[in-house]
Image: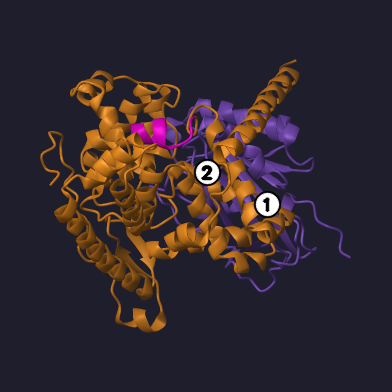
Chain colours: A purple, B orange
Amino acid sequence: MGCSSSLPDRSPGRVGGLNPDNGGDSDAKNLRVKLVLLGDSGVGKSCIVLRFVRGQFDPTSKVTVGASFLSQTIALQDSTTVKFEIWDTAGQERYAALAPLYYRGAAVGVIVYDITNPDSFHKAQYWVKELQKHGSPDIVLALVGNKADLQEKREVSVQAGIEYAEKNGMFFIETSAKTADNINQLFEEIAKRLPRPSPS
Amino acid sequence: MYTTQKKMVIPFEIQTEITILRPSIHARRANLVVKFQDLYGFTVEGNVDDVNILNEVREKVREQGKAWWAMEANKGANWYFHTYASSIALTSSLRFSVLVNAMTLKKLIRKGIPPSLRPKVWFSLSGAAKKKSTVPDSYYDDLTGAVSDKITPATKQIDHDLPRTFPGHPWLDTPAGHAAVRRVLVGYSFRDSDVGYCQGLNYVAAMLLLVMKTEEEAFWMLAVLLENVLVSDCYTDNLSGCHVEQRVFKDLLTKKCPRLSTHLETMGFDVSLVATEWFLCLFSKSLPSETTMRVWDVLFYEGAKVLFNVALAIFKMKEEELLMTHSVGDVIKIIQDTTHHLFDPDELLTVAFDKLNFMTTNLSKQRKKQETVVMAELDQRLRRLNTSKLRVNG
């Protein structure tokens, strides 16, 4: 179902173990990237990851404490593979001081808000600023409006998301971890935007 | 035994037999993953060997129960409490019999308190009973009654987290279970507004309810845990206490497993990546339930240092394997696989208390040292963010 484009973790082309540096590129064909998810509590960070990695929606996923780690490899059209090493962080405010631990060296920052909750959109902007200032200089940033299936409860317009993302040079997408809408697209788009190491 | 409590008694019984929920004749041969309920009613996934281990554990628990009952018959019903009280009071003039009893008690506790005696033993030995005795009998009812309708950031977060605490548990994940966890957490958030509510406490409160069986006793256990057992400020505003513990732990690992520590560091693996959850949920989110409870048996008697023993033991058990890893992801995977499958508590506790002798370290001195560093760092972060905010706005 959900993850039609993803390969199992042990895809033959995986280069795990060959690059000792954390989150660095592997080679031109097989990338390994560190990705961090940030955003307010309850916006659906864990649900997005579980949908992407396991292809399931778990309406009762557990509260994340500290952060949890999962990985998933996807294959792109040009036969490159990208292994995402995903850090899914706790959303409660008091965990914020731990965030640098997870975004340090990350090649991708995915900042999530809930389209039914304007406060979470505000919080997303805080994370964007922190990553712009303190994340890796060439970090790829994505802004994600989740819970797009709850149209009738929408309080953050698509336009607001687009505008903010454009202004900050980010990739923008609205997703629904519940219906799987745009989840794979999110990760595929990120993969396309990754800086590629020059083939040697 | 503990049915005389005036509070609602939780209608949850310790499982007498481990039952496989989806049995399969092929499971044994193919070593397939099966789902089963553990002693405290949690559905866990494992192979048939894991089920067998759990059944052995249950048998050991029963044997251990006999040892405790024999002590009661021999020394009287509350012998452990008298032992505890007199070992505290008579530090300068320890009588031999007291000393012997204290050593017996420590050993017995490290071997595990039988689930049926846990509420009673925890309540007296942790200091919760004493804490409760200093306030009027109606304290818990008055507190929860007075705050039940109040809405604060803490109560909002609690309400949000209730269904996400132990989803699928036969009692915790019912309206009655949610309501009980809620009252304990909301009550505590008003008792200590510096803590309010911190994610992680939901798991701790839920486990306490399962063991103590009455809300009031679970509440006092939570109070004694945060106010006396653990270091202060573990769960407050910026989790500074937790940050301190992480750093102390990092130093301990360097001291006890220098090769591993260097290896992890070269890969960019910081122990906080896994240990934050351990220290804030007190292992309840990582270890199987009976193993967690065995850690808590010792925690409530010997104090917060126990968390270091256990955390260190987990790394120590897998030291060789971890030395072979090449990426942070591999390390996390090994650690997670290990903790999730530690169904035999003795396997972990033997390493934690018999094989690792590290308490030569002066913990309070270490904590003091790290406290200064952590405070400076947190302060620096705050200032850095404030200046960046000014720049963005200006």
Indicate left or right for A189 with B83 as reference: right
Range of the magenta residues? B222-232
In the rendered structure, find residue B50 and report the number of the disc placed on it.
none
Residue under numbered circle 2: A45
Task: Give the labeled residue for mark 1.
Answer: A34
Residue at the extreme left of the image, as rendered: B4
Q: Position of residue B9 (x, y in %)?
A: 16, 41
Q: Is residue B304 above or below residue A25?
A: above
Q: Nearer the viewer, residue A40 or B260?
A: B260
Q: Label 2 sits on what residue type?
A: Lys
- In this view of the protein, can residue A149 be seen by the observer? yes
Q: Is residue B127 above or below residue A16?
A: above
Which chain letter matches label 1?
A: A
* Tag 2 subunit: A
The quarter of the rendered structure image containing the C terminus of chain B is top right
Which of the 4 image quadrants contains residue B350?
Answer: bottom left
Contact between labelled residues 1 and 2, with CB atoms less than 8 Å apart: no
- Please tell me whether residue B12 is drawn above or below residue B196 in the rendered image: below
Q: Is residue B364 left or right of residue B130?
A: right
Q: Is residue B227 magenta?
A: yes
Residue at 66% from the left image edge and 65% from the top image edge: B323
